[in-house]
Image (cartoon, rainbow, N blue to C red):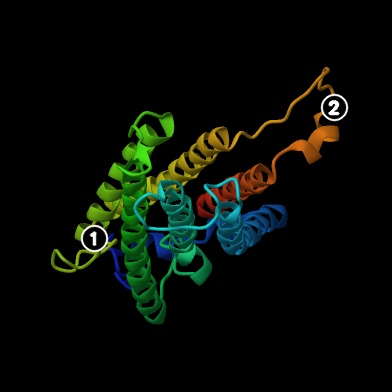
Amino acid sequence: MQKRRTNSMSPEDGEYDDQAAQPSIASERTGESSKSSGFLQNLQSVSATTSLLLSPVAIILVSLWVSNESMGGGGVSWSEGDSKRVFNWHPVLMIVAYSIMNFAALIFRVSGTSTSARGISEAGAKKRGIMKAIHGYVWVACFLIGMVAMLAVVKSHNDSVSGYIANLYSLHSWVGVLVISLYILQLTVGILAFGGLTGGTSRFAVPSLMEIHKYTGALLHLLITATIMLGIQEKEGFVQCWYEVTEKDLFPVMNYAKIPSACKISHGLGLVVLLMGVFTSFALARFPVL
């Protein structure tokens, strides 16, 4: 007599038993569909790797940017009366935090321990546990780095020697406060729900919460990408990223040399950050089999 299959969820494989027992839909598809699925997966792997390789490039560019003479004399400081160079800590630390967070966002994808993968073995589950711990610790580290970056802004804007500057007057600052608030919420929920602080709650016990967690994490990455680009644009206004023209500027590329060097670096930094956001977003997407 054939045994009746149950719908119980197995922590080892992360899928329902009856789903695992059903014939593979993908195996019944045409060779063209299988190739399409493999192509997308390979493209996502390349996208993730590219995004990770761009992370140190972003850190190098922001270091070159704040070292430029136009950025308050160049370099960083934490001294009273040197507010412009104190502020330079803000973009440096934010880009460092963003680059590290980029690694944390992709760690499950590049390690092959994503929950979207069917049939996680015992060894795979153990590896995923290690990746989950790294993911959580890196997010906490990014939060701490971000707080120091925010402190640099407050310190530079409230320097009695250099002169006081208003806080929270720009769109960048408003969006930044919103994104940081969402980040704190995401981090708190992640720690409470998946950090083992509530009796070892796992993804398999609350699958819907995990899906929300993954969606908001990817959304946050895009929001942070946009916020950084807003910050770069705002700072470029202070650096005066423009050039004088005496006639119609019909071929701007001919005047490329007139753009201040600091602005060329910040433009490059903005493009790198944008590409990181695009590549990471693509790598984290879950595409159906076509």
The CA distance from mark 2 to mark 1 is 53 Å
Q: Residue furthest top?
A: 248
Q: Which residue is mark 2?
A: 251
Tell me residue 112's x, y (percent).
50, 69
Q: Could one spot residue 287 in this view of the protein? A: no
Q: Going 32% across and 37% down the picture, which residue do you hit? A: 178
Q: Secondary structure at mark 1?
A: helix
Q: Nearer the viewer, residue 226 or 280?
A: 226
Tell me residue 45's x, y (percent).
61, 62
In this picture, residue 230 sits left or right of residue 130: right
Q: Could one spot residue 198 in this view of the protein? A: yes
Q: Nearer the viewer, residue 168 or 111?
A: 168
Q: Secondary structure at mark 2?
A: loop
Q: Going 50% across and 53% down the picture, which residue do you hit? A: 284
Number of labelled discs? 2
Q: Going 49% across and 71% down the picture, which residue do you hit? A: 111
Q: Nearer the viewer, residue 204 or 92?
A: 92
Image-quadrant location for residue 122: bottom left
Tell me residue 212's x, y (percent).
33, 47
Q: Going 54% across and 35% down the picture, which residue do you hit? A: 238
Q: Amino acid at mark 2?
A: Phe
In this picture, residue 32 sits left or right of residue 67: right
- Callout 2: few (<14), some (14-19), or many (20+) C-alpha neighbours within 10 Å? few
The dot on residue 279 is none
Q: Does label 2 or label 1 sit earlier along the sequence?
A: 1
Tell me residue 29's x, y (percent).
63, 54
The dot on residue 191 is 1
Quadrant, the N terminus: bottom left
In this picture, residue 283 sits left or right of residue 256: left
In this picture, residue 194 sits left or right of residue 14: left
